[in-house]
Image (tube, rainbow, N blue to C red):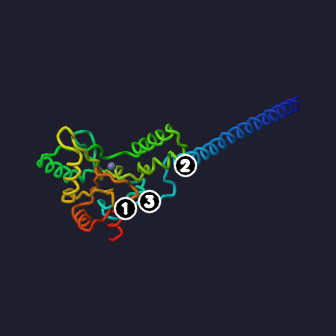
Amino acid sequence: MERCGQRRGYVQSGYAQKNRYRYMYKSFSRIALIALIVVVGSVILQIGGRFLRQNISFQAGMDKADTSVEWNLILVNKDYAIPDNYDMELTELSNGEKVDSRIYPALQEMFDDARMSGLQLFVREGYRTWEDQQAIMEERIAEYQAGGYSAQEAKKMAESYVSIPGTSEHQLGLAVDINADTSVSSSDEVYAWLDANAYRYGFIKRYSSDKTEITGVNNEPWHYRYVGREAAEDMKKHNLCLEEYSESK
Ligand SMILES: [Zn+2]
């Protein structure tokens, strides 16, 4: 009986062990399968994310702007994109537009003096986020596509008028589009005053008609960029755009 009992016990425990192994094997394969799904899934997400980001950003493989220069001289254009980690403190203007806090005093002084001269002007646009610039670009591409151009043609045309996201000076917070309040002053009056005086406050007309080939941007008499008084005076005196000035440094 005793032996039999032992035997029975042995058989039973052997069976239970087999079951336990089977159970453990099932659990392990389940865990392995889950781990595999997690690994493969994250790889797919990463590759997909990178692919999307490159497509959205337009600037895959572009050089980044040199941020080792003085902050006011950072050069951003079709060849040099704003580095991803670029950060600035912003000050909000009375109309809700924002600019880099460091240019605010000079901008205010320039506007005060322009108003003393009888002009009425305002900042139509200051700082833009990456998403703002992206939206402007997409809107323009859609306009051209609606006009019958292919996706590729539309993108190319839009890029000749709108800065590629990541390459707009507005994203630096150092540029402002200045418009006339046309109920008081004409656009021409405001643009002429800015052209003659902005350098005194450290601002330059960034995209003038005689520098289009270098800047890659059409004439924009409203777009002013802060570079600091010293640089602005130098650029005005020698008729240099920021690309030429940066190269001469
Ligand atoms: Zn602008």
**Residue hosting label 3:** 79
Task: Kindly identify which numbered label has been placed on residue 137.
Answer: none
Are the two marked residues, 2 and 3, in contact with CB atoms closer than 8 angstroms?
A: no
Instruction: Tell which circle, 3 or 1, labels the residue nearer the N-terminal end.
Output: 1
Provide residue 52's location: percent of width, then percent of height. 54, 45
Which residue is nearer to you in this view: 68 or 220? 220
Provide residue 56's location: percent of width, then percent of height. 50, 46
For label 1, count other residues whose C-alpha is less than 10 Å away and answer few (under 14), some (14-19) or many (20+): some
For label 3, count other residues whose C-alpha is less than 10 Å away and answer few (under 14), some (14-19) or many (20+): some
Instruction: Tell which circle, 1 or 2, labels the residue nearer the N-terminal end.
Output: 2
**Residue hosting label 1:** 67
Name the residue type under label 1: Thr
Give the total number of marks visible in the rendering: 3
Name the residue type under label 2: Arg
The residue positioned 83% from the left and 34% from the top of the image is: 10
- Toward which corner of the image does residue 236 lie, by quadrant? bottom left
Residues at marks 3 and 1, CA–CA distance in whole angstroms? 14 Å
